[in-house]
Amino acid sequence: MAGALLLAVLRAQAFGQDAITVTGEILDLSCYLSHDLKGRSHRSCAQQCAKRGLPIGVLAEGGEVYLLLEDHNNAEPYEKAKGLAGDKAEVKGKKFVKGGVNSILVSEIKGQ
């Protein structure tokens, strides 16, 4: 029993699943990664790209970028994030790291 519990804890740590809160700009990752476009001047384009289904993320105040993931059991916060592309927001959720990619399964988002 103790071995199974330890294995579950180690597996959760390996895949992330830590609660995280990140404050920063919601990004349209396609334009940000390929053309370094961000900020209020890019807001309209970022929101259009997000609504078309292109990937979105958050640029944390410390400079880290996180891919935002939709929680299939609660899609509302992720949908709200699309409308905040180009704006600053606080994102809460579970952090996952896989293949060097940081991501957040979005459970809550607030525009700032």
Image: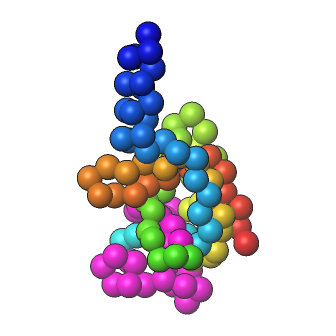
Tell me if I can see residue 49 in this picture. Answer: no
Which x, y percent locates residue 8? 42, 25
The residue positioned 43% from the left and 84% from the top of the image is 37
Tell me if I can see residue 104 in this picture. Answer: yes
* Quarter occupied by residue 82: bottom right
Q: Is residue 99 magenta?
A: no
Which x, y percent locates residue 18? 52, 45
Please determine whether, in this image, residue 68 is positioned above or below residue 50.
above
Q: Which quadrant would the N terminus be assigned to in this image?
A: top left
Which x, y percent locates residue 75? 58, 43
The residue positioned 58% from the left and 47% from the top of the image is 19
Q: Is residue 37 magenta?
A: yes
The residue positioned 43% from the left and 35% from the top of the image is 12
Q: Residue furthest left?
A: 99
The residue positioned 64% from the left and 74% from the top of the image is 88
Q: Nearer the viewer, residue 100 or 51?
A: 100
Segment tinted magenta in the rendering:
31-60
Q: How many marks?
A: 0
Left or right of 48, for residue 83: right
* Quarter occupied by residue 14: top left
